[in-house]
Amino acid sequence: MSPEQVQFMEVAPENWINVGGRYGAALRSYTEKFPFVMHGLSLSIGSPSGLDWDLLRSIKTFIAEHSIRCYSEHLSYCSDSGHLYDLMPIPFTEEAIDYVAERIIQIQDFLGQRIAMENVSYYAAPQQEMSEIEFLNAVLNKADCNLLLDVNNIFVNSINHRYDPYDFLKALPGERIAYGHIAGHFEEAEDLRVDTHGADVIDPVWQLLDAAYAQFGVFPTLLERDFNIPPVDELLMEVDQIRGYQRKYDKIEQGDPQSLRKPTQLEKV
């Protein structure tokens, strides 16, 4: 594995904050060799509880210590009086837009930079007043934050909630894309997909990624694989497949390195 094949990586900060010893040294060796982005797990942006400022202070320190290029999180919540295992759906309501956007603004002001919010997979839509795309775009606009575009989540949600994934893609604000995710999922039933990150990426998801590059230009893209991890050579074949799709659109103008807008692919740690 080399910087030519894997051009940057993503880390979950909650797994590495305050980790020292040989594990901390190993992480440092990677963050010195590769550019890194950071994808949070427990910010819980839609939680009814207050923001976790201790966590945010640790994240701000971690960003500085490891020269993190971009901090992203899930547009969901995972806590109230305690942390849950799953990411829960935020109601698609006007009240939730105002609430979530204000919390994102506070976080961005504290960190001194924009963060990127991920379009998440969800399996229920409680108190729904609008569509997923209307809610997502309203939050991004009101908070003036970036987007982590998860292509697999669009596909999974399109099956589970019966919408056209290409129409959803076309409605996204491409100028806000910081980077992207692609992953495999589990087919529970013909009309139910589960976002697992535990399988190979399937052809319809690759095709949706290709459509995203065609529409928005090439953006850095992370291959997510959380379990059932194959040998490294097999995993890197999918990383190379990302690069193959990106080469089709090699005339895209390069952007701000802070947002990592350049042809690349990533691996997750």
Image (cartoon, rainbow, N blue to C red):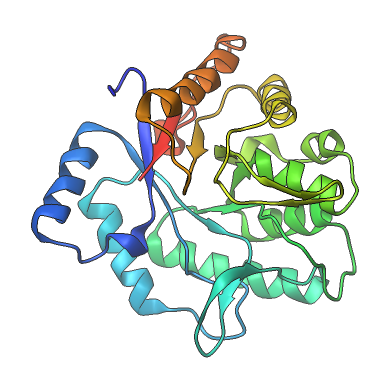
Task: Residue 155: name its quadrant.
Answer: top right
Residue 72 against residue 172 in the figure, above or below: below
Residue 15 against residue 114 in the figure, above or below: below
Q: Residue at x 83, y 33 (%)?
A: 166
Q: Which of the pair 36/94 is nearer the observer?
A: 36
For the N terminus, the quadrant is top left
Q: Quick check: 153 left or right of 15? A: right
Task: Residue 210: name its quadrant.
Answer: top right
Percent across and percent down for residue 101 are 64, 67
Q: Is residue 173 visible?
A: yes
Q: Which of the pair 251/39 is nearer the observer?
A: 39
Q: Quick check: 154 left or right of 116? A: right
Q: Is residue 263 visible?
A: no
Q: Residue at x 57, y 59 (%)?
A: 74
Residue 182 against residue 196 in the figure, above or below: above
Q: Residue at x 63, y 22 (%)?
A: 217
In this figure, what is the number of numbered marks?
0
Percent across and percent down for residue 109 are 45, 64
Residue 106 against residue 150 in the figure, above or below: below
Q: Which of the pair 82/179 is nearer the observer?
A: 82
Q: Residue at x 51, y 25 (%)?
A: 238
Percent across and percent down for residue 38 are 40, 50
Percent across and percent down for residue 103 are 57, 72
- List the single residue furthest toward the bottom: 81
Q: Which of the pair 206/32 is nearer the observer?
A: 206
